[in-house]
Image (cartoon, grey):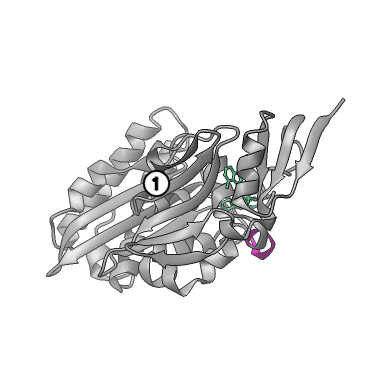
Amino acid sequence: MNMLTVARPRSLDAISALMSDGRPLHFIAGGTDMLIAGRLRPKDGILVDLGQVAELSGISVVGQHIRIGAATTVARLAEDPVLAARLPALSQAAAECGAVQIRNRATIGGNIAEAAPAADLLPPLWVADARLEIRDHDGSRLVAIADYIASPGRLITAILLPDPDPAPKSGFAKLGSRRELTISKLNLAMLMRQEGGRIVDLRIVAGAIGPRPQRLKLAEAALGGRFLSPKALQLFAKALSDEVDTAIPTRSSRVWKRRAIVGLGYDVIAAMTGHSPRHPLFAGAA
Ligand SMILES: Cc1cc2nc3c(=O)[nH]c(=O)nc-3n(C[C@H](O)[C@H](O)[C@H](O)COP(=O)(O)OP(=O)(O)OC[C@H]3O[C@@H](n4cnc5c(N)ncnc54)[C@H](O)[C@@H]3O)c2cc1C
């Protein structure tokens, strides 16, 4: 017999009360991952619909942080002017998630908790050093996104992004089998700060080259501390390919991903710095 019941709480306090009930909790937000035909659905416990909890939605600036409620939709992320100005990589990734119908239902919390290797919101959140506000039966705490592991009954209530002034440059690019409505075969986010043209802070994270997003420290080291020049970009390109060789040495997709990642890296740098990807700077991409 199916022992699953459904709850539609209207507040975080009501969810906390369910957490102390002792039965397994399963959260559902937009349902775009959970309700896909063929997925194993929970058979017992309480299915908690997060859609009625106003505290879980919205984007606000709180002190030195941008706070995003976990049930904020991907469509809302894509159109938010604060994010577009402070973390364009996240706006761009959101704008390229699925299609209109998916973006209108899908949530940022669901994208993080599902933790798909190709999830588009994870690389921008990793480069931005996002922290997650987590609530379970033991209370609330903050966890760095790189340390987050989904587990039943652990609710993500919000995502906190540092909000430095001036905002760093950031960007995102993905590659799929179509232009629209396509799951990433490879994606890449970068966050960069320059002083007098020199790159002084650089973080790069790629998705779909392993079970989790990967920070590309070789590529960061190749470009960090330098001025943008054809030579620096050639070193950067080699480092990006080396990262793929190391991450997926035995996968057949390594052959094309080691070249494709260079294209994504160059596209993101061109967009962040206002250059055309056809600028002579990028001519040495081998
Ligand atoms: C046709 C299609 C196209 C898609 N295209 C893309 C794409 O281009 N890029 C991309 O990244 N993804 C894509 N997705 C995947 C999906 O839309 C996203 O991962 C979405 O953000 C999931 O959010 P949701 O609210 O629908 O999650 P749900 O389906 O509601 O939940 C997913 C999982 O997360 C858990 N969960 C949800 N919210 C929370 C929370 N606050 N705290 C803890 N756990 C939680 C649920 O228990 C469940 O295990 C696509 C999906 C479909 C069906």
Q: Pick out the residue farthest to the right.
A: 1
Specify the quadrant of the image occupied by residue 217: top left
Q: Which residues are magenta?
A: 99-103
Q: Is residue 140 left or right of residue 127?
A: right
Residue type, mark 1 in image: Ala
What main secondary structure does the magenta stretch of the protein show?
Answer: helix
Q: Height in image: 273 above or below 98?
A: below
Q: Height in image: 283 above or below 8?
A: below
Q: Is residue 138 left or right of residue 201?
A: right
Q: Residue at x 60, y 32 (%)?
A: 152
Q: Height in image: 150 above or below 99?
A: above
Name the residue that disc number 1 marks: 206
Pinpoint residue 106: horizontal percent, then vertical percent: 63, 55
Q: Say whether residue 42 is magenta.
A: no
Q: Residue at x 38, y 48 (%)?
A: 126
Image quarter (top left, top right, bottom left or bottom right) of the N terminus: top right
Q: Tag 1: Cα neighbours inside 10 Å, few (<14), some, or many (≥20)?
A: many
Q: Is residue 89 left or right of residue 111?
A: left
Pinpoint residue 109: horizontal percent, then vertical percent: 55, 49
Specify the quadrant of the image occupied by residue 39: top right
Of residues 159 and 54, the one nearer the viewer is 54
Pinpoint residue 166: horizontal percent, then vertical percent: 25, 70
Q: Residue at x 53, y 71 (%)?
A: 79
Can residue 116 be seen here?
Answer: no
Q: Pick out the residue farthest to the top.
A: 1
Q: Is residue 96 left or right of residue 50?
A: left
Of residues 256 and 164, the one nearer the viewer is 164
Tell me the element at label 1: strand
Can residue 282 be seen here?
Answer: yes
Is the CB of the residue bearing disc 1 within 8 angstroms of ligand 1? Answer: no
Pinpoint residue 270: horizontal percent, then vertical percent: 31, 67
Specify the quadrant of the image occupied by residue 116: top right
